[in-house]
Amino acid sequence: PISFLRGRYLIPRSVNLDAMRARAAAGDPALARDDALSILEGLPDNYASNEAVTAAYLSGMGRRDRWSAEAGLRAERTETKTLGTVIVPASVDAGVGDVLAEVNNGGELIIARAVPTANRYYTWLPTMALAFHASPVWAFRTSYFEQLMRPQYIDIVNYRIVRTGQLQSDEGNPGLEPTSIQTWSVATDYGAA
């Protein structure tokens, strides 16, 4: 092992490549190449996602005596198109999408498909602010606004990987919609003009 930081930490030795090559040359089954597994492990990394956002804004502001106000509205249309990979045992294959590969994995037929999906949603994001200017240096304000937090691309890609041996399944959800974040604030300003 290699020590560092005055011997407080140790880094274990790395893999002995010569020993690994010797084991592979001797036919160690633990080091045998598994083409089927290589295909299945590489396919989920192949996905495509396209997002188009169209937005329009409307805003206004006004002041009367010691009051000022602002209001706005953002309208959005979001459209997503994704192409993901679904990898499942043939026994639960839905038959949707183009077949990328069929692999015999230990006697179980596994099917990989490219599955396209699309989603569209509309959102309205208002903003409002109101201020009372009590004096040339004091102001009292309140505001409200909404923000949008969209799902990450990998979360909306239609992918599914079923591992029957491990009783495990991972999948994306192309129907996910954004989360709205609503924020209220109240403030007192000193030194306001």
Image (spheres, grey):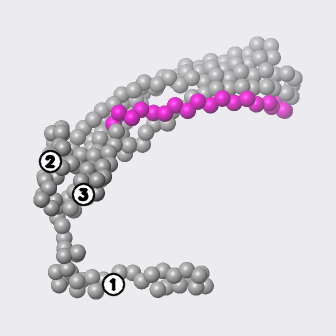
Look at label 1 and name its amino acid.
Answer: Asn
- Residue depicted at x 18% and y 44%: 92
Main secondary structure found in the magenta portion: strand
Q: Which residue is mark 2?
A: 90
Q: Tag 3 or tag 2, which sits nearer the N-term? A: 2
> Residue 182: within the magenta?
yes
At 24% from the left and 53% from the top, the residue drawn is 164
10 Å crowding of disc 3: few (<14), some (14-19), many (20+): few
Which span of residues is magenta-colored?
174-193
Residue 82 percent location from the top left of the image: 30, 39
> Is residue 50 toward the left or the right of residue 126 in the image?
left
Q: Which residue is mark 1?
A: 16
Looking at the rendered structure, the secondary structure element under dot 2 is: helix
Vertical comparison of 50 with 28: above or below: above
Residue where numbered disc 3 is placed = 165
- Identify whether 103 is placed above or below 180: below
Gap in angstroms between the C-alphas marked 1 and 3: 31 Å
Residue 55 left/right relative to 133: left
145 inside magenta stretch:
no
* Real-space CA distance between mark 2 and mark 3, rounded to the nearest whole angstrom: 14 Å
Res 24 → quadrant: bottom left
**Please, what is the three-letter code of the amino acid marked with disc 2?**
Ala
Q: Quadrant location of the C terminus? A: top right
Q: Position of residue 166 (x, y in %)?
A: 28, 57
The residue closer to the viewer here, 63 or 169, is: 169
Instruction: Assess whether mark 3 and mark 1 are in contact (beta carbons under 8 angstroms).
Output: no
